[in-house]
Amino acid sequence: MEKRLFTSECVTNGHPDKVADSISDAILDECLRQDPNSRVACETTVTTNFCLICGEITTKAVVDYPAIAREAIRKIGYTYPGTGFDADSVEILCRVHTQSADIALGTNDEVGGAGDQGMMFGGACTPTPELMPLPVALARALSNRLTECVHSNDLLRPDGKTQVSVEYDEDNNVVGIDTVVVSIMHSADFEMSELRKYVREGVIAPVLAKYGFDIANVPNIHINPTGNFVIGGPDGDTGLTGRKIIVDTYGGYFSHGGGAFSGKDPTKVDRSGAYMARYMAKNLVAAGLAEQVQVQIAYAIGVAEPVSVRVDSFGTGKIADEQMTALLRKTCDLTPAGIIRRLNLRQPIYAPTAEFGHFGVADRPWEQLDLAPVLKELANI
């Protein structure tokens, strides 16, 4: 029989798009640090020795945008002069203005409406301790391990990608890992055979072992399959905020809404709604009400209450999906203000999400399991 495979990818925080995300979220954090009520929609693009910051920002904060951007770039690891993109020599331009007065009419604190129309999805499932789909959990863990190695090995550079193909049986149970792909930017002094050995032993093997898999049982492993990866980062490819939306969520395993996350304050339901949907889905699974759950929320711009809420347990629910939906409606305030209060989102907590992932990270407010006991008691199972 043909294998039943599902593949997810991830990128490191030095990927051009993630560099842009990190700058946008670093600016958001600085605005929130000084003014928790800041309204921020910050977009960044990066290319060879150039960074453009633009967007709509209404805040009492006094922000040195170039300084924040340079520090974000430096933190990622682009500090090598003459390589096409480094924190000290990159040219930075800013084109920032305040939020549209028309949008503000329906989204200010008095009205409390959603910052835009749209639908958001959140998902959770049982195959991993963090209740994330295994393919994206592994791809994310590999990317984060690469980032750790970049900061401890002078021959590695920040730009990298990972991809994992997981085999499932006909009942959607994990059979094993079929393919792992890892590409990492490096110094010209890192000999390819040594780099591949380093990545295999120092990145892939320990990450797979953490999830209970032996690298010896993975039939296909590709490390820098095209060979040299010396030219990379924004010098090798243009980066743009919000372009890695599938990487930022569930690797395609669950559905994705229409909006990106980075650079947006929590009044933008593209972000806060997706975080709340993850929180609700994870707590439903943690409560034992289903093995796999997807939650959808949808909003109209300027309207506080969602226009729809839907739970899909893909046939794994202990109670009906409609009952789970009703439980969420009963226990959760799904207005933007309610979500912000419950998850305490007016904090400078967003730069790490751009760097190391939005979901499956224990210290994120939307990853907490405080709702699970309440749901379990109300469900009476």
Image (tube, rainbow, N blue to C red):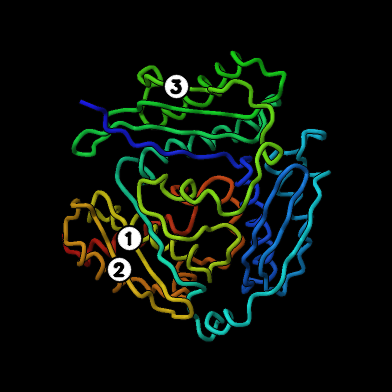
Q: Are marks 2 and 1 in contact (CB under 8 Å)?
A: yes
| For residue 27, side relative to residue 249 (left or right) | right
Residue drawn 53% across the image and 86% down it: 110
Between marks 2 and 1, how big is the CA–CA gap?
10 Å
* Dot 1: element: strand
Judge whether 21 appears above or below 220 on screen: below
Give the labeled residue for mark 1. 295
Q: Label 1 sits on what residue type?
A: Val
Pointer 3 residue: 221
What amino acid is labelled 3 in the image?
Ile
Closer-to-camera residue (365/85): 85
Would you place residue 130 above or below residue 279 in this image? Answer: above
Check disc 2 and report its element: helix, strand or loop.
Answer: helix
Is disc 2 in contact with disc 3, using a CB cutoff of under 8 Å? no
Gap in angstroms between the C-alphas marked 2 and 3: 42 Å
Q: Which residue is mark 2?
A: 328
Q: Which image quarter is the N terminus in?
A: top left
What secondary structure is marked by label 3? strand
Q: Nearer the viewer, mark 2 or mark 1?
A: 1
Q: Where's residue 225, x and y in %?
A: 53, 22
Earlier residue among tags 2 and 3: 3
The quarter of the image holding the C terminus is bottom left
Dot 2: within a 10 Å radius of its alpha carbon, few (fewer than 14), some, or many (20 or more) residues? many
Q: Say whether disc 2 or disc 1 marks the residue closer to the N-terminus.
A: 1
* Residue drawn 34% across the image and 32% down it: 166
Q: Position of residue 29 (x, y in %)?
A: 65, 61
Q: Residues within 10 Å of mark 3 (few under 14, many from 20)?
A: some
Q: Name which residue type carries label 2.
A: Leu
The residues bearing labels 1 and 3 have C-alpha atoms spaced at a distance of 34 Å
Give the mark, 1 or 3, whose residue is nearer the N terminus: 3
Taking the image as shown, residue 277 lies to the left or right of residue 108, namely left
